[in-house]
Image (cartoon, helix red, strand yellow):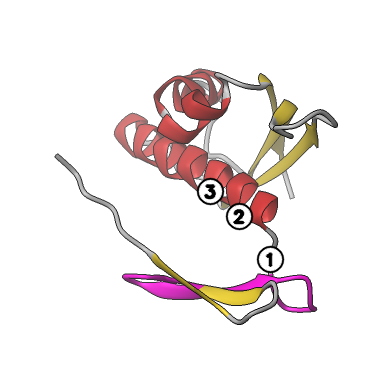
Amino acid sequence: MSLKEVTLKFTNEFSGELVAPKGIVKIGTEEGTVLPYDMLLGALGSCLYSTFLDIMNKKRVPYDRAEIHIVGEKRTEVPTTLKWVKVDFKIVNPEKEVGIEQAVKLATEYCSIYQTISHVADMSYTFSIVTE
C-alpha cells in the first residue's frame, strides 16, 4: 500500500493552500494562485512526465528538456467532469529520435492519473521533437 496525504486549509472564502509533504500550493482566484482544474491538469502533466522520464532513462536517451501543454474541456452538465483532454509533448534536443514515440505512448499507458481521467474524458496526445 502506498498512502498519499495532503492537507487543505481555506479561509471562509475560496482562498487557501494545499499543504503537501514537500511543498505548498496557493489555491484561489487571485493572481499567484491556482484553481482546482489547474491542479488536476498539472497533476496529469507531472505524472506523465515522471513516467516518461523513467522510460527515457531506461532507454538511455538524453535530451535537453521536455514541455507538456495540456488542454481540456469541461462538460456543462453536472457533474462538470472533463469532456476531453489533449496532451502535447515537446521533446527538445534529444540525442536521438529512436524510442521517443514509444516512450510517450508508454507514459500514457502507465501514468495512473492519465488512466484515471480517461474513465471520464476522451484522451489524446501528440508529440514533437524540436531542435534548438
Residue hosting label 1: 34
Determine contact: label 3, label 2, CB under 8 Å: yes
Q: Quadrant of the N terminus?
A: top left
Find numbered disc 2 in the image and state the secondary structure of the residue it sits on. Answer: helix
Separation of residues labelled 1 and 3 (CA atoms)? 12 Å
Residue hosting label 2: 39
> Seen in the image, is 96 located left or right of residue 89?
left
Evaluate whether residue 128 shows in this view.
no
Amino acid identity at mark 2:
Met
Relative to 94, does residue 18 appear above or below in the rendering? below
Find numbered disc 1 in the image and state the secondary structure of the residue it sits on. Answer: loop
Residue 83 versus residue 32: which sits nearer the camera? 83
Neighbour tally class for label 2: few under 14, some 14-19, many 20 plus, Cα within 10 Å: few
Of callouts 1 and 2, the N-terminal one? 1
Residue hosting label 3: 43
- Magenta span includes 27: yes
Q: Which residues are magenta?
A: 18-33
Residue 67: image x %, image y %? 66, 48
Which residue, as the protein is rendered here, is positioned at the far bottom? Answer: 11
Residue at 79% in and 34% down:
74
Task: Kindly indicate the quadrant of the structure image that contains residue 82.
Answer: top right
Task: Kindly indicate the quadrant of the structure image that contains residue 28.
Answer: bottom right
Residue at 56% in and 28% down:
117
Amino acid identity at mark 1:
Val
Of callouts 1 and 3, the N-terminal one? 1
Evaluate whether residue 39 shows in this view.
yes
- Magenta span includes 31: yes
Task: Kindly indicate the quadrant of the structure image that contains residue 38.
Answer: bottom right
Separation of residues labelled 3 and 2 (CA atoms)? 6 Å
